[in-house]
Image (cartoon, rainbow, N blue to C red):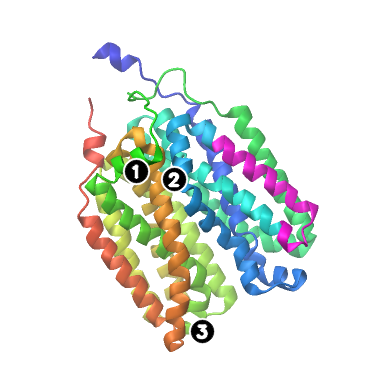
Amino acid sequence: METKAQTYKAYSYRWVILAVFMYIAALTQLYWLNFSAIDTYVEDNLHISAFSVSLLTLVFPLVYVLLSLPSGMIIDKKGFKYSIGIGAIFTGVFSIIRIINPYSYPFLLMSQIGISVGQPFILNGITKLVVTWFPQKEEATAVGLGSLALFIGMVISLGATPVLVDSLGLRAMLLVYGIIGIAGMLLFYLLVRDKPPTPARELKEEEKISIREGMKSILRIRDFVILGFVALIGIGVFNGLATWLEKILNELHGISMVDAGSISSVLVFSGMLGCIIIPIISDRIKKRKPFLVLASLVGAVCVVVLMFGSGYAVNLGNGIVLGFFLLSALPIMLTMSIEITGEKYAGISVAYLQLLGNGAAVAIVPIMEVLHGVRGTYYLPLVFIAVLLAIAIVMAVRIRETGKTALAPG
């Protein structure tokens, strides 16, 4: 047993691998939201409708739904470097070609579709990267840092894009973002290695599996099916709230767009902190389930507060709590997917969760707007969201704990 233990080693270079992944992952979110941050400018200068502008953002979850499972299978068959490398190429190349004709809507839409193709190949690779380079005791922490990168990309996109466009113009903003996209692609191929010289943990022998075989295997697992419903609700609810939060705060509480924007930014920033702190605590106490239940419970309470709590200070505090607990559920869910399905299905299990979440986002966002139109108020959409989170609480309670067994020695 002692000889066997000595054959596994966690190399410090694993943090370089994770840092490069975080950079590439943050870029996907930067490009996802960069046009939504300047929607009025794009609408006026390209002379297009508000729906056309929203399509530049909406293509990301739409393409994710289409490519999530195929990308997951490629990850499981070829490894994380092969898959993320594909995503890095699509992200880098299409981010730079946007400067060729930045005032042509068809050209921008084509470029956004190209970038969005790369997103599932990148984001679905995080768990495979972690099981390849990190020991089990650091699983949730590493996945949490990978998830943190997504929120960093969102915050930068929402904050920096309007400033760059206002001071330098649309073409210059796209050039800056294109350069950092190409830099990400080059960094990935220069620095990222497929696997460490010595495994970081005991790995099961790789098997070539098809999408059908992989899906049949993971969907036979009761806890993973339940986790899928929780992911569907959690990711979908976050996208719904992120899309309509400014209008909700303005309509229900008279909060200005500027103040509502600051609340949205603080919510995401708080989520970033949650993605660091909660996974570290989870790894230390070897528990996952309590944090999954807590995320849905706190989320439901915060939605009720959002309905009735008035004033900037109350809603700012509510946003901090909501972001910290709700967004930190993402790395917990991704870690649980490894522990439930096993390393063999690390790619396709995450792909399936992301597929459900993005599919729900495509549905929940318009459903909230339809419900808003029923009575001309956002109370009904928020009741809808609160009910979904209540269902997620019940589902999360039914999942068996994965952390203790997964992290047990030997």
The residue that disc 3 covers is 254
Q: Nearer the viewer, residue 16 or 339?
A: 339
Residue 390 vs 187, above or below: the answer is below
Q: CA distance from mark 2 to mark 3?
A: 43 Å
- Magenta span includes 96: yes
From the viewer's perspective, tell me whether residue 52 is left or right of residue 345: right
- Residue at (42, 80) in percent of width and height: 371
Quadrant assignment, res 409: top left
- Residue at (43, 52) in percent of width and height: 355
Q: Nearer the viewer, residue 51 or 309?
A: 51
- Magenta span includes 218: no
Mark 3 or mark 1: which comes first in sequence?
Answer: 1
- Label 2, secondary structure: give it: helix
Say few, some or many: other residues with alpha carbon within 10 Å of mark 1 (under 14 / 14 to 19 / 20 or more): some
Amino acid at the residue labelled 3: Gly
Residue 158 in sight from this viewpoint: no
Mark 2 or mark 3: which comes first in sequence?
Answer: 2
Residue 364 drawn at (x, y percent): 43, 68
Read off the magenta span.
Answer: 84-107
Mark drawn on residue 215:
1
From the viewer's perspective, tell me whether residue 245 is left or right of residue 184: left
Mark 2 or mark 1: which comes first in sequence?
Answer: 2
The residue that disc 2 covers is 69
Task: Point out the image quarter for the C terminus.
Answer: top left
- Label 1, secondary structure: give it: helix
Residue 125 vs 201, above or below: the answer is below
Magenta span dominant secondary structure:
helix
- Label 3, secondary structure: give it: loop
Say few, some or many: other residues with alpha carbon within 10 Å of mark 3 (under 14 / 14 to 19 / 20 or more): some
Q: CA distance from mark 2 to mark 1?
A: 9 Å
Mark drawn on residue 32:
none
